[in-house]
Amino acid sequence: MTASPPQVVLLAGGAGTRLRPVTGDVPKVLVPVGDRPFLELLLDQYEGTGVRDVHLCLGVHADQVLAHLARHPRPDLRITWTVEDHPLGTAGCLRLAAPALHDEFAVVVGDSLLTEPVGELTQRWHATGREAAMAVLHNAGALVPSNVAVADGLVVTYDKHAAPGSLEHVDYGVLLLRRTALGRLPDAATQDLSTLVASLVEDRELAAVEVGRRFYEIGSPRGLAELRAVVGHGPGADRVPA
């Protein structure tokens, strides 16, 4: 039986500088893909795979995201949010959001459209008995530069600056965590998730959950153009690629 999907925590507070001038004054999650904002594709996907709770970690242009949600309510989703008033980093925003987080949750990068249900990933994580899990794709540098090494079912290296060709897997954009794992973060105002990942790797507590289907991303002009081509325009623009 597939585990119930956990709360999804969407990291959506970045400025999207790599997409300028495409984004302009629009937050990255509201960039049009097909006929709709990217956020709508994400929420469609979560609803379609049984997710019921989504927490948004917002920052730059949060007012636009909240206004969009007010105009387009999702009765079947419980959507909560926190807004950072200055950049806290990808882990610092989780610390800010801690009171709203469930005991277990899936941290999802806000510029990635995934093709694997988080409920299935959660079930496989639970089977490992580890404190956390990272979804990884055997990539060999094909989609984006590989940044993960896997051995014996564990993430043993996580390096966003690895030399080309030195690693075979890439972070799929999902980190499955227990809320207690946030206690691994040092006491600093700004924190990156790589700090938390490094601690889990060192203690051999980060399971590698390998997926077989690619992801799509809008974090770069190339990725955005590719997803727009896949989704298309006009009739069928609501389709989420598999």
Image (cartoon, grey):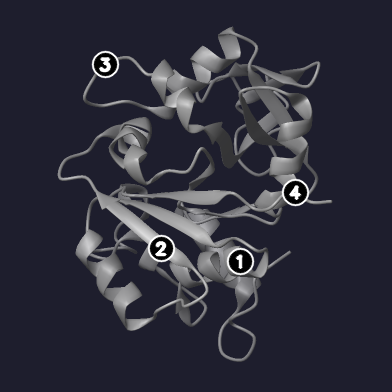
Residue where numbered disc 3 is placed: 187
Mark 3 is on which residue type? Asp
Which residue was labeled with disc 1? Answer: 45
Q: Residue at x 36, y 46 (%)?
A: 100
Calculate the distance from the C-alpha at mark 3 to the C-alpha at mark 1.
35 Å
Q: Nearer the viewer, residue 23 or 158?
A: 158
Q: Position of residue 103 (x, y in %)?
A: 51, 38
- Horizontal side, residue 155 vs residue 97: left or right: right
For the residues labelled 4 and 2, say whether their Cβ atoms are less than 8 Å apart.
no
Residue 200 at least partly seen? yes
Tell me the amino acid under the disc marked 4: Glu
Instruction: Indicate the quadrant where residue 212 lies.
Output: top right
Q: Secondary structure at mark 3?
A: loop
* Residue 173 place in picture, x, y as percent: 57, 42
Specify the quadrant of the image occupied by residue 165: top right
Q: Nearer the viewer, residue 158 or 50?
A: 50
Q: Disc 3 versus disc 2: distance between alpha carbons?
A: 28 Å
Q: Is residue 192 above or below residue 67?
A: above
Q: CA distance from mark 4 to mark 2?
A: 21 Å
- Using a 10 Å C-alpha cutoff, classify the residue at mark 2 as few (fewer than 14 neighbours), some (14 to 19) or many (20 or more): some
Could you tell me if residue 165 is visible in this image? no
Disc nearest the viewer among 1 and 2: 2
Residue type (three-letter) at the residue carrying disc 2: Ile
- Nearer the observer: mark 1 or 4; the answer is 4
Q: Which residue position holds label 4?
A: 120
Q: Which residue corresponds to the image point at 81% horizontal and 16% vertical from the top-left?
A: 152
Query: Circle 4: is it few (<14), some (14-19), or many (20+) Cα within 10 Å?
Result: some
Disc 4/disc 3 C-alpha distance (Å): 33 Å
Describe the element under mark 4 as helix, strand or loop.
Answer: helix
Q: Which mark is residue 79?
A: 2
